[in-house]
Amino acid sequence: MYRYATELAPERAEYLIGKLAQWIVSHRLETPAIMLLEAIKPLSFIGSQMWLMYGVPMLGIVVDEHQTSEYGLLFEDRENLESLIRKIEILAREADKKRKETEEKKK
C-alpha cells in the first residue's frame, strides 16, 4: 500500500513549480493563472487539504496518485505559491521577448 508523503523536499517543490509554470506559459495562460493564484493565496492551505482529501482519489483513477498528491502538498505553503507566481512571470517575460524577436526577424 502506498503511503502519502507529508511534505515535499525543496528540490522536488522547485521541480514541480518549474514544470507547472512551463505548462502555464506554453499555453499562454499567464494572466489568468496569476490572477487565480493571487486570489486563492489566503486560502491555499485549506484548498490544498481539500485537494488531498477529494481531488487525489478522484484523479488517481486517471493519473498517478503520487503526482497529484504532490501538488496538494506544494500548495500547502504560501511561499510555494509566491515562487510559482514569480516563475510564471519570469518565463512569460522570456517568452514575450522570444516572440518579439521572432516577429522582428520576419519583418
Image (cartoon, helix red, strand yellow):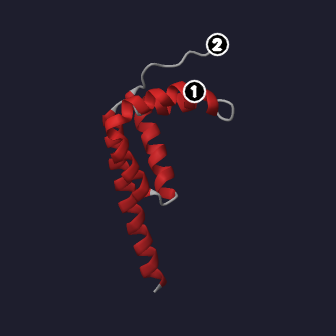
At numbered mark 2, what does the secondary structure look like: helix, strand or loop? loop
> Can residue 5 be seen in this snapshot?
yes
Depth check, front residue: 21 or 51: 51
* Residue occupying image coordinates x 35% and y 35%: 43
30 to 100, vertically: above or below: above
- Which residue is disc 2 drawn over? 1
At numbered mark 1, what does the secondary structure look like: helix, strand or loop? helix
Sequence-wise, the earlier of marks 2 and 1 is: 2
* Residue occupying image coordinates x 33% and y 40%: 41
State the quadrant of the N terminus.
Answer: top right
- Quarter of the figure with residue 55: top right
Depth check, front residue: 81 or 102: 81
* Residue occupying image coordinates x 49% and y 19%: 5
- Which residue is disc 1 drawn over? 66
> Can residue 64 be seen in this snapshot?
no
Q: Horizontal and vertical percent for residue 38?
A: 33, 47
> On the picture, is 50 further left or further right than 85?
right
37 to 69, vertically: above or below: below
User: Is disc 1 surrounded by few (<14), some (14 to 19) or many (20+) residues within 10 Å?
Assistant: some
14 to 50, vertically: above or below: below
- Quarter of the figure with residue 10: top left
Alpha carbon distance from label 2 to label 1: 12 Å
